[in-house]
Image (cartoon, helix red, strand yellow):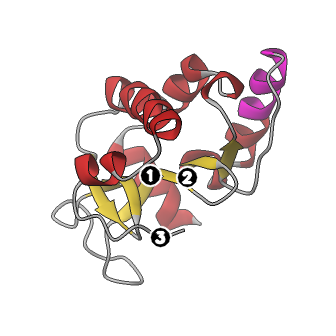
Amino acid sequence: MRSGATTVDQYIADLPDERAEAIRAVREAILSNLPDGFEEAMNWGMITYQVPLEIYPDTYNGKPLMYSALASQKNYMVVYLMGIYTSEEARESFETAYRATGKPLDVGKSCIRFKQLDDLPLDLIGECIASETVDTFVARCKKA
């Protein structure tokens, strides 16, 4: 479900209370661990954490390079982690650590789906977010 919200605060305000609380908590985990150089914005109908075009303008679609995103979908909420999408080693390490938490893992290629906040290991999400600088992420994306 794409949102028409133009600000993060509006996006969260439009959510049902339980989802708003979960999205706020995940957002805080992301912002607390987001390396310098990435920016928070609304893009693609969701909250995104991206490489500004001023830093890397040569994207295939002319939009900022997305590092992470956070969204409320029809049947679940989702956090996108592009760092695990661009590295098989990072993906395997993340999934192993996630399973070790005992929480249910519902993963796509770059997304972690969750129905309630308790399903998500916020510390691990924060570690994943903190694991790359803008420069290493851009370099990995260029290589891919």
Q: In the visual, does 1 lie left or right of 48? A: right
Crowding near pointer 2: few (<14 within 10 Å), some, many (20+)?
A: many
Amino acid type of the residue tagged 3 in the rendering: Arg
Residue found at the far bottom of this picture: 61
Going from the N terminus, do you reach mark 2 or mark 1 first? 1
Going from the N terminus, do you reach mark 3 or mark 2 first? 3
Residue 105, how many percent across, how many down?
81, 35
| Quadrant into which the C terminus falls | bottom right
Residue 134, how many percent across, how many down?
34, 46
Q: What is the spatial separation of the Cα atoms under label 1 and label 3, in whole angstroms?
A: 18 Å
Q: Which mark is residue 67?
A: 1
- Examine the image and state in which quarter residue 5 appears: bottom left
Going from the N terminus, do you reach mark 1 or mark 3 first? 3
Q: Which mark is residue 82?
A: 2
Q: Residue at x 27, y 50 (%)?
A: 8
- Examine the image and state in which quarter residue 94 appears: top right
Q: What is the spatial separation of the Cα atoms under label 3 and label 2, in whole angstroms?
A: 19 Å
Q: What is the spatial separation of the Cα atoms under label 2 and label 1, in whole angstroms?
A: 5 Å
Amino acid type of the residue tagged 2 in the rendering: Met
Q: Which mark is residue 2?
A: 3
Q: Residue at x 54, y 64 (%)?
A: 143
Mark 1 touches mark 3? (CB < 8 Å): no
Q: Residue at x 36, y 53 (%)?
A: 14
Residue 103, how many percent across, how many down?
79, 22
Amino acid type of the residue tagged 1 in the rendering: Tyr
Q: Which residues are magenta?
A: 93-101
Relative to the observer, which residue lies in front, 144 or 48? Answer: 48
Mark 2 touches mark 1? (CB < 8 Å): yes
Q: Residue at x 32, y 33 (%)?
A: 35
